[in-house]
Image (tube, grey):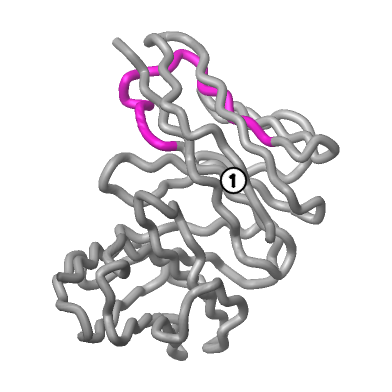
Amino acid sequence: QKEVEQNSGPLSVPEGAIASLNCTYSDRGSQSFFWYRQYSGKSPELIMSIYSNGDKEDGRFTAQLNKASQYVSLLIRDSQPSDSATYLCAVRSYGQNFVFGPGTRLSVLP
Amino acid sequence: KAGVTQTPRYLIKTRGQQVTLSCSPISGHRSVSWYQQTPGQGLQFLFEYFSETQRNKGNFPGRFSGRQFSNSRSEMNVSTLELGDSALYLCASRPSYSGAGDTQYFGPGTRLTVL
């Protein structure tokens, strides 16, 4: 059973701080890693994808991947109240379906 | 480019009935996946279709079925509805099935309530 684990939260950070979201996965053959953001009552929207070890930056977001530790994280710099949402980590192996974690609820306090 | 569309957006049914949900993928996307999302279970994979063939299937009973048409549009059907089938049903599309780097994009979902 392929599993993706995340702390359910809520993770509370003050406005302007760095939010750090973590995800671990069980399948060593996983090749693709994704972060989605989901606002309450809405569908998930893609934030970032990452495929190679290291960091990938996109604006205020940085994804970090460590395949040896089976760990992927998302950093949100200068957090804004509008970043308050549930963040879903998704993992995929070649030819397999996406496996999602339970999500971490982030609350950015003004 | 238009996003993934799903119809209907909201649906109320009673136990024992059946329901059909529809999904139109992003133009040019040939793979469509379906998910069930509930507060208790999170986002659960139902099945994925590519080129009108089911490629992957999640751990759901046979009451849940789907199909894909030649234009990549997809439908899912749930027969003999149960109260526990109340959920947000999400469709996601991506360009192909075999691309390891393919990103999937979600539609707005269909909110199904079973009374």
Left or right of residue A95, residue B38 in this image: left
Quarter holding the N terminus of chain A is bottom right
Which residue carries the number 1 mark? A34
> Residue A86 location in percent, x, y?
41, 37
> Residue A109 location in percent, x, y?
32, 13
Left or right of residue B77, residue B27 in this image: right
Q: Nearer the viewer, residue B115 or B43?
A: B115
> Residue A2 location in percent, x, y?
68, 57
In magenta, the rendered stretch is: A72-86
Q: Crowding at label 1, few (<14), some or many (≥20) Cα neighbours within 10 Å?
A: many
> Residue A64 location in percent, x, y?
69, 30
Residue at image point 40% right, 49% down: A44
Residue B87 in view: yes
Does A108 sit above or below residue B104?
above
Q: Hey, what amino acid is under mark 1?
A: Phe
Circle 1 sits in a helix, a strand or a loop, which is it? strand
Quarter holding the C terminus of chain A is top left
Residue at image point 55% right, 72% down: B58
Q: Is residue B77 magenta?
A: no
Does A108 sit above or below residue A49?
above
Residue at image point 27% right, 80% down: B81
Q: Nearer the viewer, residue B67 or B5?
A: B67
